[in-house]
Image (cartoon, helix red, strand yellow):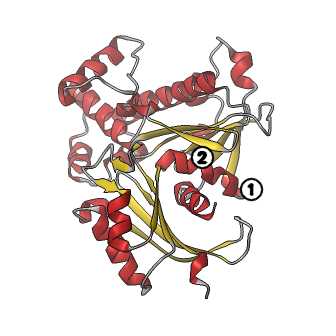
């Protein structure tokens, strides 16, 4: 086995860390094989290096030509301070510790590079549009947080657009905005609404506003669970349905905003960990998600932009691999 063609790549998110060993024995980026793969719960480790050391030990390999990591936070001066967990990763520190080359990418910057490695059965057309092969592309996706990026001339640019301010439209949403500002002592952001964390925040707000509608048994189950958003999004409970309607409304609006900001005629890719779970809802033109994207104002612009739903949660790892391969 030619070890120079082996890449340790990972997607380090707010909830999970996914690490893989990629092998490539040709000059074609798409000709890769995954030798080993593991997924870790971040809350079971004090810091990322504990996960990395654990993974390296499991592979029984002494060294790697490089380590390439997609990280859920902005990369500034070769350092990532994560947006939703209290971790920091420094490029020079990792290079010195593990004696190898290290690449750090924002997780959605990596998603942008990973687009070229998508398989046909991993993409669902949400809006056909009129695709321009050399046009600007963008990615937006809800997981633990809300990631965004755009791609121009094969270069991917990281973004922290998920942390832009939330814009309420009615009395209930203004109350939700105030609830978030009081709870976190900061401005309400769109990520506080459109994310797995956001689903939990919205439900908490509704449970306080409408106490008579609370199902006490379900409410206690949610409070005790480590997968609160999953329980809420799967439930037919009245408050859970209200929660998801508000979530999907603003998810659609944020996709619309991204399309208007970047005009991604090369494609808008809806990624993130929640997309595969909700794909049937997302592609239904009669649901609030699609209606929020295709509002009357500038409808002709949005309808001409190709929009895709991505069914794999491996895009970040593949983008980290693509960056290392290049």
Vertical comparison of 129 with 35: above or below: above
Q: Is residue 213 visible?
A: no
Q: Is residue 157 visible?
A: yes
Q: Which residue is mark 2?
A: 112
Residue 322, quarter of picture: bottom right
Could you tell me how many numbered marks the image carries? 2
Vertical comparison of 130 with 313: above or below: above
Residue 279 versus residue 297: which sits nearer the camera?
297
Task: Kindly identify the residue that appears in the image at 51 percent across and 41 percent down.
Answer: 141
Q: CA distance from mark 2 to mark 1?
A: 17 Å
Residue 18 versus residue 88: which sits nearer the camera?
88
Residue 215, quarter of picture: top left
Residue 190, quarter of picture: top left
Q: Quadrant of the C terminus?
A: bottom right
Q: Which residue is mark 1?
A: 120
Q: Residues within 10 Å of mark 2 (few under 14, many from 20)?
A: many
């Amino acid at each position: 086995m030619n070890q120079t063609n082996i890449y340790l790549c990972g997607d380090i998110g707010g909830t999970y860390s996914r690490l893989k060993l990629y092998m490539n024995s040709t000059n074609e980026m798409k000709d890769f094989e995954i030798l080993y793969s593991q997924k870790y719960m971040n809350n079971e480790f004090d810091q990322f290096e504990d996960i990395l050391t654990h993974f390296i030990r499991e592979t029984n390999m002494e060294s790697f030509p490089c380590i390439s990591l997609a990280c859920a936070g902005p990369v500034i001066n070769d350092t990532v301070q994560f947006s939703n967990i209290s971790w920091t990763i420094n490029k020079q520190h990792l290079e010195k510790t593990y004696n190898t080359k290290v690449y750090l990418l924002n997780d959605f910057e990596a998603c942008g590079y990973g687009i070229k490695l998508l398989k046909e059965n991993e993409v669902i057309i949400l809006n056909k549009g009129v695709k321009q092969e050399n046009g600007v592309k963008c990615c937006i996706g809800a997981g633990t947080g809300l990631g965004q990026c755009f791609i121009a001339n094969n270069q991917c640019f990281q973004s922290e657009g998920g942390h832009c301010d939330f814009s309420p439209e009615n009395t209930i949403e203004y109350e939700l905005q105030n609830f978030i500002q009081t709870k976190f002592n900061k401005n309400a952001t769109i990520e506080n609404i459109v994310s797995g964390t956001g689903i939990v925040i919205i439900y908490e707000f509704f449970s306080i506003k409408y106490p008579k509608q609370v199902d006490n048994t379900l409410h206690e189950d949610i409070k005790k669970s480590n997968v609160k958003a999953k329980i809420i999004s799967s439930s037919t409970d009245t408050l859970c349905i209200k929660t998801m309607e508000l979530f999907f409304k603003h998810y659609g609006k944020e996709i619309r905003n991204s399309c208007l900001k970047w005009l991604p005629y090369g494609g808008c890719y809806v990624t993130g960990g929640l997309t595969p779970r909700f794909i049937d809802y997302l592609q239904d033109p009669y649901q609030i998600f699609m209606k929020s994207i295709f509002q009357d104002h500038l409808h002709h612009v949005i309808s001409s932009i190709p929009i895709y739903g991505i069914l794999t949660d491996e895009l970040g790892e593949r983008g980290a691999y693509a960056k290392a391969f290049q």
